Image (cartoon, rainbow, N blue to C red):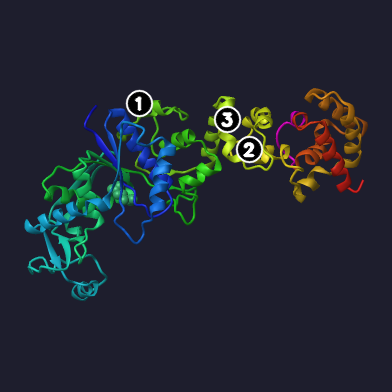
Amino acid sequence: MTDLRVRFAPSPTGMFHVGGARSALFNWALAERSGGRFVLRIEDTDAARNRPEWTEGIISALAWLGISGDSPYFEGPYFQSAFEEQHRAAVAKLLADGKAYHCDCTREDVKARTGSEFQGYDGYCRDRGLSEGVVRFRTPDEGVTVVEDKIRGRVEFPNDALEDFAIARGDGSPLFVLANVVDDMEQRITHVVRAEEHLSNTPKQQLLWAALGAAPPIWAHVPVIVNEKRQKLSKRRDKVALESYRDEGYLAEAMVNYLMLLGWGPGGDREIMPWPEMVELFRLEDVNPSPAFFDERKLRAFNGEYIRALPVEEFTERCLPWVRTIPGFDREVFAKVAPLAQTRVTVLSEVTGNVDFLFLPEPVFDQGSWDKGMKNAPVEILTGYAERLATVEWTADALKTALEEVGAAHGLKLGKAQAPVRVAITGRTVGLPLFESIEVLGRERSLARVRAALERLGA
Ligand code: GLU
């Protein structure tokens, strides 16, 4: 047990972003490794943009990743809105100490004075002794504020480039930059590990820590996540919601593993690793500050590996939320083909399309697959195979030999002869191994499907 205390402080203003998930995991790894605490703080002070369902979404998405109150390292959730009194007290203290002041300037006032474009606040009200209006923090005029960042090293911010930034609105309500610091202070946070986009807030926040009489935490700003065009992932353009990956049937453990590698690696070329090992190896110092590429194809490949590593019973179980939605679903029948599906899919939702033909009264045909499957002597093959299906020994091997023979009689190799049969039976041109599928489907239903296909072909 150490006194390391990290936090994850999302604002509940939208779907839970994969970047947020990555920050949460880095913090979680640190807490677990050191036996410290991970504080979940919901920054819900932007009443206009918050919604309770986003908060619930965050909590359930974190739990899916394994971050929850079931662990001794978890603390919270705390809600920022509950601490407004402390935020206001901090503002009052800064005002009383002369480290902050009221200001009644509008943007236009400042523009009119400084002439050009708005370049930040010009400090006009610093010594006017107002007792109302926006509260601004008095930033130093000279020198530099040095942020020591565990990932980026030393980052210098010249103080003359820092405006006297606002810490509370005209109605007294505290602003993010202050509330965030006061909460970190009250919650005795030792390490602030968060998104790179907050680096620009950090000199201001570090000044606030000092002005409130406390030593700042250790800072670490994790790299931005980009798409294949090197653009920052955005919710309008990219698939960023963790929930959408969960719903598509990515396994949490694959997702965790992949997200941990966005900006971090244990060195060498090892990538697939169980969580305890990542916890053991994770160091903030080893996080790379340059943008991390979110490569969904790679994530898919990871997921496929994780799926194949599952014990088959567990795979079967974990497919249930998807396959259960197939009308006529039967768990025992599914258990027979699950091992075949397990070697083929990369996300669990794909299993549905691979096995639904077993449960539906008839397969779902799409015209493209039908046309593709019915290219080579379909009537001859299906007619010949229907005859064999009526009497053949009901094993995958015998079913295969029978089709080989029917194909040979029409000059077709098995691969070509399979195509019309596969479409007739499953509705698709690719899928699970055909003869095992027919075996599970059963003689009656298989025969009925082959005959129905012949009818469709007008034979
Ligand atoms: N609530 C802020 C956000 O969601 C987090 C700020 C922080 O981590 O310090 O971006």
List x then y, in percent, for residue 113.
Answer: 18, 74
Tell me the residue that label 1 is attached to: 280
Q: Is residue 11 magenta?
A: no
For this view, does 6 lie left or right of residue 301?
left
- Amino acid carrying label 2: it is Val
Check the image and report above or below for 214 versus 31.
below
Residue type, numbered disc 3: Phe
Q: Say whether disc 1 or disc 2 marks the residue closer to the N-terminus.
A: 1
- Secondary structure at numbered mark 3: helix
- Quarter occupied by the C terminus: top right
**Residue 430: within the magenta?**
yes
* Relative image position of residue 18 (x, y in whole percent): 43, 45
The mark found on residue 315 in the picture is: 3
First in sequence: mark 3 vs mark 2? 3
First to last magenta residue range: 428-437
**How many neighbours does mark 2 have within 10 angstroms: few (below 14), some (14-19), or many (20 or more)?**
many
Is 297 or 245 nearer to us in this picture?
A: 245
Residue 348: image tag? none
Residue kind at label 1, given as amino acid type: Glu
